[in-house]
Amino acid sequence: MLETIAVLAVFFILLMLGFIFYTKVIKSGVEEEKEENIQLSAIKIAQQAAALPELQCSQNNVIKDNCVDRLKLEVADNIMQSPENEIFYYDKFSFSKITVEEIYPNTKEWPLYDRPLDDYTHTLVTHIPISIFNPENDENAFGLMEVESYLK
Amino acid sequence: MKKAQTEIIGLAIIVILVILGMTFVIKFLMDKPPVETKKEFTQAELASNMLDAFLETTARENNCKFTMSQLLQNCGQGGGITCNNKDSCEYARDAANEIFEEKTLGKVWNIPYEFKVFYSNDENDNLFQPIGKACAGNKKSKSYIIPTTKGPLTVKLDICS
């Protein structure tokens, strides 16, 4: 009788350990996948922001990479934050904040989009160095596009 | 010792071994490196975008509207351009220091990096004192070639991993 109880006890201990082990492995995999998806989504938003046709520089219809047109920048916030375009930009940028900042030769900031998540726990910030081209005098400034994704 | 007791001791040893094995596996699983997809992407893009934007940047002074690329080219050819009482080499280095060290990579983001400009045939033949520190381990690099009358110049930015 005692032997049977001992064997059963050992069996259940092994079963329990196996279950704990299995749960840990599954949980670790799910969390890793979730983190990767969050990061990929932040990258996607940053790439979409950097390639916005509303801001891109172009000369003779040729788009210049990594460049933002200053004249477009001056009016972009009106377009991007107007209520009629809210859904269009929400589909692109979800819950995030996008600003462009000139850091050389002068300093200036252009807030473009801001839709915070009410109960966010942390944010992922991506900085994209860009040229800010002024077509009026053909000069370039050094700037940063800051894309901040709100996360729960 | 009865036969049954011996069997139970054997079983206990097996259980202890299994527990040790599982502890080891769980520890191994928990110690996996964190997901760094965004960091890898950012580092890969950073060197390229930084250098690209820097070389196109126009100097601050009104009587000196040259791009950093033009100033470095002039510096590599022996100088001649003066902006704000500084020669082209000094002016370009100061601008690079302000952008990379003071306002972005160095003091603000604390990302180790090295920016240097040298004649392409000799990496040690620097036009001016490099900015930042040489990377000890892995790095993401981007370089551009600027043609000069004294031979091609390489402008290189290393972002240390």
Image: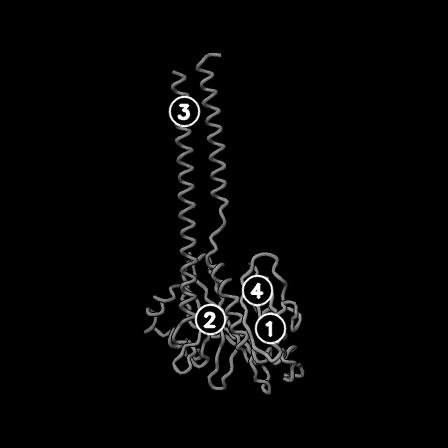
Q: Residue at x 48, y 20 (%)?
A: B9
SS assignment at label 1: helix
Task: Please report, as a chain letter, where disc 2 is located.
Answer: A
Label 4 marks a residue whose chain is: B
Three-letter residue code for mark 1: Ala
Towards the viewer: B151 or A104: B151
Callout 1 and callout 4 share a chain: yes
B134 sits left or right of A45 in the view: right
The secondary structure type at the circle numbered 4 is: strand
Q: Position of residue A84 (x, y in %)?
A: 32, 74
| Residue A9 numbered mark, or none | 3
The spot of residue A101 in percent (x, y) is 50, 73
Residue, disc 4: B158
Count neighbours of disc 3 (C-alpha within 10 A) and say few if under 14, some if 14 to 19, many if 20 or more: few
Can marks 4 and 3 be said to lie on one chain? Answer: no
**Residue to which mark 2 is pinned:** A99
